[in-house]
Amino acid sequence: MRTDNTHHLLAAARQRSEKARQQVEEALKQLDQTTRPATVSELARTAGVSRSWLYTQPDLLEQLHQRKRPGRTSPTGSSVRASEASMQRRLQLAHQRIRQLTEENRRLQERLARAHGALREARR
């Protein structure tokens, strides 16, 4: 049987996430020093991360919203709403993630059922 090396994958994912968070922190500082609008899109572009990843980081979004200065406005002078295509894409991604999680839950439930069966069999 192969050894479980998932800890390497988890460590790599953790490092990527930490690096992305550091990039966003630096980008927030840069945005404070410019006249560019402090939007999620601008932050993602400046930090080199995806907007979808940023939306999964509520603390970073909160920092972005706190840094918006009262004197700063969007290019239109009022809040800019997401486009219909953007909203559709976000909805598709959410549905995709739900399907992935549902499938993962199903697989885990099957593994648990097999493990319980093996335990029952071992006790006999």
Image (cartoon, rainbow, N blue to C red):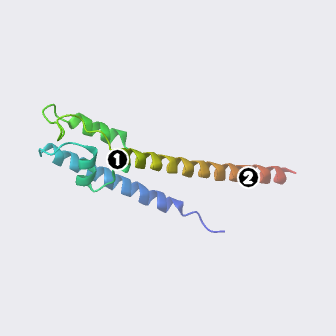
Asked if residue 19 can be seen in this view, the reply is yes
Q: Position of residue 119 (x, y in %)?
A: 78, 51
Quadrant in which the N terminus appears: bottom right
Q: Which residue is disc 1 drawn over?
A: 54
> Quick one: which residue is furthest to the right in this view?
124
> Quick one: which residue is furthest to the bottom in this view?
1
Asked if residue 56 can be seen in this view, the reply is no
Tell me if 121 is positioned left or right of 30 in this view.
right
Label 2 CA crowd tier, 10 Å (few <14, some 14–19, many 20+): few
Mark 1 residue type:
Leu
Tell me if 109 is positioned left or right of 45 in this view.
right
**Numbered tag placed on residue 91 in the rendering:** none
**Numbered tag placed on residue 115 in the rendering:** 2
Q: Position of residue 106 (x, y in %)?
A: 65, 50
Q: Which secondary structure, mark 2?
A: helix
As rendered, which of 3 and 25 lies closer to the eye? 25
